[in-house]
Amino acid sequence: MTRSADFVAMGKRIALGLDRRGRALVGLPPRSGGASIAEAFARIMAGGEGGDARHYGATLDALVRAAEDAPGPRRNREIYDAIKPEFDAAFYFSRYPDIAHHKFDPVAHYIRAGAAEGRDPSPVFSTRAYSERYAEVEKRGINPFYHYVTEGRAKGYHGFPMPDFEALSDMLGARPAETRDALVATHDDLRHRLEHGELGRMAAKAAEIDPLVAQSWTQALRVRVPPFNNPLSVGRIAFLHALQEKAGLRRARAVVVTDRFGTHQARRMDRHLAEALAARMGGEEIVVISTQPGGRVPKGKLPEGVRHIDFGAMIPDYPEHAGRFPDWASQRVLLEFVRSLQPRMIFNADSRSFDELLVSHGRALAASSAIVTCLVPAGRTYLGRETGAALTNFYRHMEFVSWVCSDCRHLTRSLLDRFRIPDAWREQVIFLPSWPDPALARAADDRQEPAGRPRVLWAGPVTTPRQVNVALAVARAMPQADFRLFATDAPEAPEPPGPLPENVAWAGSVDDLSARDLAAATALLHTGPREDVPPHLIDAAAAAVPIAARTGASDSVLLADGFYWAAEGTGDAVAPAADDFANALAALVADRDEARARARKLRDSVLAARNPDAFHVALQPILEKEGC
């Protein structure tokens, strides 16, 4: 034997252990299942026997007839005789063309190799799903379909490949075995009509005119019975029902959709909307939906009666799709769930998932509900360019969104002026002043001047280095002070932005910024854009923490001249900006009495302009016009 022949022989030995795809890849036929039905097939095709062909065509009909007449192997006779009456040969041939090509007895092939390869004997039985669902099958090493026919069916088992089969059966008010029997009966009836009845005759006639129709027989042999169309369809229905049960199977007059409830990233607009809407309509009429996992609501953060749905945490695992529910399917379920609540108004409080949903389904949703989009200020890239949903999605949504609101005064002005909003839209852009936690203002009265080294807080984005680099440069310029840094753009345990100076401590997410941190702070360093007024800045003002910030802040009420320490002449380069901020902080620390006086003035100014009453008054025109 030559060396090349040795390699060929070795390759064939290896191929004996391959699955059906591997064998096809190296040009080998599927593992034989016993005697061939080729002779019987040839005889039938030659017209030697058989009656009228089934409607799906003479070739497949001849294969099925030959398989029906096959005597079967001597080995595994008990298994062969048990499963053959329920084995769908037409399906097996059409689903696995290699078996049809080599004209194997399909039942014998399934027993010897097909089951091990994960092939299915029928469109209503999944070999893999059955083996995974019932551990005793694999434990005993028994043929899955044989187990089902001889034992499993009597126990109420089923072989459908839907993980949520039982859940959907329960929704239909039936036991899984009852649903199984009804589905199998419906499937068999439809198949009989396609193979022998008028329905199949019409399809066969159409195939004579258009050959493409004939190609659909492969799918026709896998009849799908709604709502059990496929695993994903069943999963979507079960997921939707679980959401509806979580909502108490009741409707809602208003829905608030957010990423994670009550976080700084959502700028608290979700919580303030829930409180204002509950005060007007009653808590039982409001549903808050968190579209990202981790949207748990601490006790007392929502008004009594308001229903909270942690949609992101309820998204099911799905083995059919790499262990996760597809994003498009989740969005579709979110759409269907919101519509099922039949709300008069839908408030999108900066949910990215809902933003994406609106791009494709916004018009359909707007046909039955008024949509209010709540925008947060745009962030900036490391090159200083604006980015964010307010910039990218506003024009996509403006034709079907009823109202636009923001808790940033600059953003509402920018939408009206810089974005050239039509005059007819100007009254539909609303400024809603979010308010700080009242407990911070009460604590400010008892605030004691921190002893020891000055303590400076900073919060900002760390995924783009522009602002954090300024803060680190300021810390290096002020070794006499201690700095604590918080991230506003990475809620899941963000990492520190590289090596830190000795006087800098990384504190994690801004959501962890507490009243205790504010009470112990000498100052808050705000290096963000002049137009941005983030929640932590409002909190610091309410807690009477002295603030050092850029000059010319847009919210004249929040950072009015004389109420904060201004970093004059701030430019774009890191070093000059750091010097400006360091000078402002040094002046603040040097005059503690003046710093406290300015901080109290700022606190009084902020609380007068940003409070629940002001928010409710600003929201009232929207609710009145929409009949809420």
Image (cartoon, grey):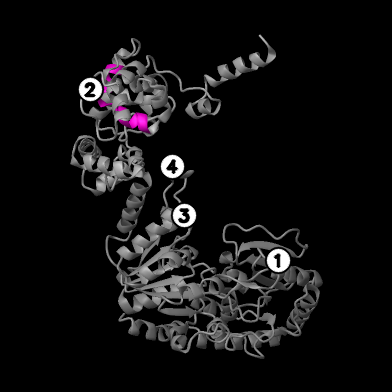
Q: Earlier in the sequence, mark 2 or mark 4?
A: 2
Q: Kindly identify which residue carries mark 3.
A: 327
Given this view, does label 2 or label 4 mark the residue nearer the observer?
2
Mark 2 belongs to which amino acid? Gly
How far apart, in angstroms, are the residues tagged by discs 1 and 4? 40 Å
Q: Relative to 519, is 88 above or below?
A: above
From the viewer's side, name the closer residue of 170 and 153.
153
Q: Around disc 1, counting alpha carbons within 10 Å, would you say few (fewer than 14), some (14 to 19), or many (20 or more)? A: some
Q: CA–CA distance between discs 4 and 3?
A: 14 Å
Range of magenta residues: 80-94
| Residue bearing mark 4 | 320
Q: Which one is closest to the eye, mark 3 or mark 1?
A: 3
Numbered mark located on residue 465 in the image? 1
Say what amino acid the circle numbered 4 marks.
Answer: Glu
Instruction: Specify the principal SS of the magenta part.
Output: helix
* Residue nearest the observer in this picture, 372 or 569: 372
Distance CA(mark 2)–CA(mark 4): 41 Å
Please give the residue where the numbered disc 2 appears in the rendered image.
Answer: 50
